[in-house]
Image (tube, grey):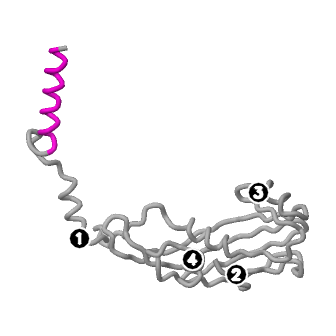
Amino acid sequence: MKHHREFEIAWQGLKEGVHEYEFLLDDRFMKEQDAPAEMHDWNATVKLKLDKKVNFFLLHFDIGGRLALPCDRCGDDFELKLWDEFNLVVKLSGDSEEDVESEDEDDVVFIPRSETVLDISSWLYEFLMLSLPLQRIHPDKEDGTPGCNPQALKLLNQLSEPEGDPEHGIWKGLEALKETNKNKRKTD
């Protein structure tokens, strides 16, 4: 991970109140953050509202944009639209790093008062990845049919159909094993 000043916010000189920032994130940023290689053509915009208070900051991340990634069903790439919102509270804590590490909570981050800037690059990456759905499948077409590759869907349907007669195929070996087991019990 490379260090970029464009993702640092010098908070000590900021007045109390709301401050707005916008970050354009692309393949270069995601590659530096070690994002999965199958996700590409990133074009994300993150709008950040930083509300500075006396001893803490309220951060609101508004995510939009798109990327290309493979479909979990058919394997073909498709364009996924991004949209999500995340909130984070950053509190000022003791002067040393040890004081800070023991206090971290889920939606609250503690930073030492001696820190003069907020590096938000890791939060940007984390929130982008959290905005992705767990199941990534082509969206349906306007007529309601699946947007996936029709040949892949046909193959999946063929593979999911039962073999038919249980006397044939994989069940044949199981039936023979079952009979052997019955005969063994009778002799014992």
Magenta-colored span: 170-187
* Residue sitting nearer the eye, 165 or 45: 165
172 inside magenta stretch: yes
Q: Amino acid at mark 4?
A: Gly
Residue depth check, mark 1 versus mark 2: number of the one nearer the observer: 2
Quarter placement of the N terminus: bottom right
Residue 141 placement, left or right of 26:
left
- Give the crowd class for mark 1: few <14, some 14-19, many >=20 residues within 10 Å: few
Q: Amino acid at mark 1?
A: Pro
Work out whether mark 4 precedes mark 1 in sequence or the reverse, and give the earlier one: 4
Pointer 4 and pointer 1: residues touching (CB < 8 Å)? no
Residue depth check, mark 4 versus mark 3: number of the one nearer the observer: 3
178 shown above or below 119: above
- What is the C-alpha distance between the residues marked 2 and 4? 24 Å
Work out whether mark 2 precedes mark 4 in sequence or the reverse, and give the earlier one: 2
- What is the C-alpha distance between the residues marked 4 and 1? 30 Å
- Give percent across and percent down for residue 123: 67, 70
Q: Quadrant of residue 178?
A: top left
- Give percent across and percent down for residue 69: 42, 74
x 61%, y 68%: residue: 127
Q: How many labels were placed on the picture?
A: 4
Residue 83 placement, left or right of 115:
left
Work out whether mark 3 precedes mark 2 in sequence or the reverse, and give the earlier one: 2
x 87%, y 80%: residue: 14
Read off the residue under disc 2: 3
Read off the residue under disc 4: 64
- Give the crowd class for mark 3: few <14, some 14-19, many >=20 residues within 10 Å: some
Read off the residue under disc 1: 150
